[in-house]
Image: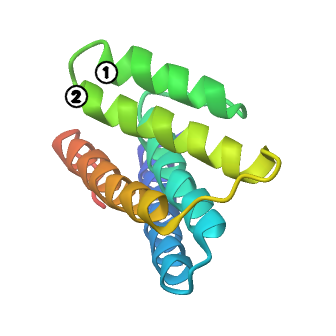
């Protein structure tokens, strides 16, 4: 992949993250908490996918994306463990709300995850800027 193609891919992934954050906000405002939890997680996922692309990494499995993020950016000290915890929590909550039976996320959970997703995407954006990517 050329440098320009990589730049476009990273921009696309961050655009997806931003759009998905907006969706989470709209769903939260409409008391659609399950949808908001889902979109908060996906905002984080798209941001991580963009970050991993800068290292030539990626996988189709969500658990693989999380594992690569932890290995390449958290365990190396590039990004703080708090981001890993936020991503793991969002993944777990999304799994539970999407696939768990008779589990309904509440407003407090959806609000908290949305705030964590905002912080997460912001930190990933900052890291990409440090690495020289125009976002």
- Tell me how far mark 2 sits from mark 1, CA to CA: 6 Å
Q: Residue at horizontal 46%, vertical 57%?
A: 109
How is the structure coloured here? rainbow
Position of the N terminus, as image quadrant, is: top right
Along the line of sight, which residue is nearer the eye, 23 or 9? 23
Residue in view at x 27 percent, y 25 percent: 81
**Which of the 4 image quarters holds residue 77?**
top left
- Image quadrant occupied by the C terminus: bottom left
Tell me the quarter of the picture where residue 30 sits: bottom right
In the rendered structure, the answer to whether residue 118 lies left or right of residue 13 reads left
Q: Secondary structure at mark 1?
A: helix
Residue 101: give its label: none
Which circle marks residue 74 in the picture? 1
Q: Position of residue 68 (x, y in %)?
A: 50, 21
- How would you rate the neighbour count of disc 1 (Cα within 10 Å): few for under 14, some for 14-19, many for 20 or more? some
Q: Quadrant of residue 122?
A: bottom left
Residue 53 seen in the figure: no
Q: Residues within 10 Å of mark 2 (few under 14, many from 20)?
A: some
- Where residue 48 appears, as percent x and y from the top left, is 46, 41
How far from the left and from the top, in percent, is residue 84?
A: 37, 30
Q: Secondary structure at mark 2?
A: loop
Q: Does the CB distance between marks 2 and 1 fall below 8 Å?
A: yes
Seen in the picture, residue 18 relative to 86 is either above or below; the reply is below
Name the residue tied to disc 2: 80
Residue ID at (31%, 21%): 74
Which residue is most to the bottom?
Answer: 30
């Amino acid at each position: 992949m050329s440098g320009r193609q990589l730049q476009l891919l990273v921009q696309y992934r961050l655009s997806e993250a931003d759009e998905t954050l907006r969706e989470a906000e709209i769903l939260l405002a409409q008391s659609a908490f399950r949808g908001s939890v889902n979109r908060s997680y996906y905002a984080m996922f798209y941001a991580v996918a963009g970050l991993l692309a800068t290292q030539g990494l990626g996988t189709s499995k969500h658990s693989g994306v999380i594992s690569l993020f932890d290995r390449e950016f958290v365990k190396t000290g590039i990004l703080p463990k708090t981001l890993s915890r936020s991503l793991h929590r969002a993944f777990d909550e999304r799994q539970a709300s999407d696939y768990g039976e008779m589990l309904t996320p509440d407003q407090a959970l959806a609000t908290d995850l949305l705030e964590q997703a905002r912080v997460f995407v912001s930190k990933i954006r900052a890291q990409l800027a440090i690495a020289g990517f125009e976002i």
